[in-house]
Amino acid sequence: MRVRTPRLVWAALGAITAVVLASQVVSVEAGLGADPTAVMILSFPVVGALIASRQPGNAIGWIMLAVGVEEAISDMLYIYAEYSLTIDPGSLPRPDLALALGAPTWVPFIGLMGTFLILLFPDGHLPSPGWRPLARFCALAMILSFIAILIAPVSFADQGHPNISNPLGIDALRPYIDALFLILLLIPISIVGCAAGLIQRFRRSHRQDRLQLKWLASGAGATAILYLIAMVPSIVLASPWDMRGPVWLTILQNIALYSFALIPVAVGIAILKHRLYDIDVIINRTLVYGALTAVLTLAYVVAVTVLQALLRPFAGQSQLAVAGSTLAVAAMFRPGRARIQTFIDRRFYRRKYDAGRTLDAFSARLRDEVDLDTLGPELVALVNEVIQPAHTSLWLRETQAAGQR
């Protein structure tokens, strides 16, 4: 089995890649354009294949591969339906059934990433046997949500086909459609529960496990920050997430979509190469520049909105508001980064922050004191406070007599 596992893994990855790429071709032929999330989606099975081929006993790799298989099935159904409805109408039977079967496929995609991927990370096992009820609840939530969407008596307007109704929908459930979709709330509840399990695992972890959990937290945190940064101006400017807004907002939205690839990349590094990187430095920089980007983006949007409202009676549709807001944000960069860096160090890296302040105080002391007998005890105390070694001793080399070397 060990010999065949890598072949099975890479064959599955090849099939997934072929189907996803074929769906892009069909989407372009149908006039819908390429899907920018394809690269992000493929990142999960690619990393899953790397993990499963090297650590076949770790369920994380197989979960990420399952995400790719699910997406491949979804794309196959999409190709079938679009080909029959748009590219060559009537060439294939029952495209409505393909749409019905493809509608709930997002449930396992989101569900596996948000529940079992973080609940079983990093070794592929539950934090403890006491978490088995939550694992069963997550599985039940995905099953019920999948069924609820599958049998809902609705049309496929969200997929671009408002005139086609769900052939698997049960008309008797039409009066209860809102209550039926309340079942979908079980998925976010499951995600919150699994996040609690990850937090508990982090509190009990040591060394290697803690380092791996930091990698996952950094990838997911960076994705959440970038998504939030893109969402705020989209809501404020009333620009839908369809890549048809201003150029800068379109770029920001694309970055947010592609940032989801950071999650599988972080998982892969954590499991396969976690000893090669100082994750604390990356987390620190992610927090600082993520928060800085969020603050500057919000400041820019607010400044543009306010200045346009103030200048419109005098300058009409002038670009003065945009230019002024850009200059203001540029001037805020350096002081903003310094303040956020100080806040992050004081809040999340308190020991490092206190050590830096202690070293600065001692450096100021060195400028005024030259007596080694006085500085010796202070230097030993400084090392004990900052580094906290098991043992400390100070050795001073004696000055050589004149004429000696």
Image (cartoon, rainbow, N blue to C red):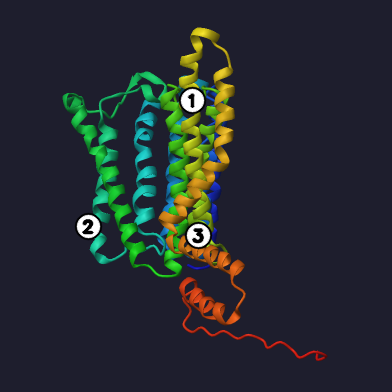
User: In this rendering, which labeled residue sits more in front, label 1 or label 3?
Assistant: 1
Instruction: Using a 10 Å C-alpha cutoff, classify the residue at mark 3 as few (fewer than 14 neighbours), some (14 to 19) or many (20 or more).
Output: some
Q: Residue at x 58, y 17 (%)?
A: 319
Residue 180 location, quadrant: top left
Q: Mark 2: which amino acid?
A: Pro
Q: State the CA–CA distance, disc 3 to disc 2.
A: 33 Å
Q: Does dot 2 land on a helix, a strand or a loop? A: helix
Report the Cα–Cα distance between label 1 and label 3: 34 Å
Q: Kindly state the secondary structure of the residue where label 1 is placed.
A: helix
Q: Name the spot of residue 365 as percent of width and height, x first.
A: 56, 68
Q: Identify the residue under disc 3.
A: 280
Measured as percent of width and height from the top left, residue 394 is found at 57, 84
Tell me residue 119's x, y (percent). 34, 57
* Three-letter residue code for mark 1: Ala
Q: Is residue 194 above or below residue 25?
A: below
From the viewer's side, name the closer residue of 96 and 402: 402
Q: Secondary structure at mark 3?
A: helix
**Residue that badge 1 annotates:** 303
The answer to whether the residues at label 3 and label 2 have Cβ atoms under 8 Å apart is no
What residue sits right under mark 2 in the picture?
A: 133
* Quadrant in which the C terminus is drawn: bottom right
Query: Closer to the N terminus: mark 1 or mark 3?
Result: 3
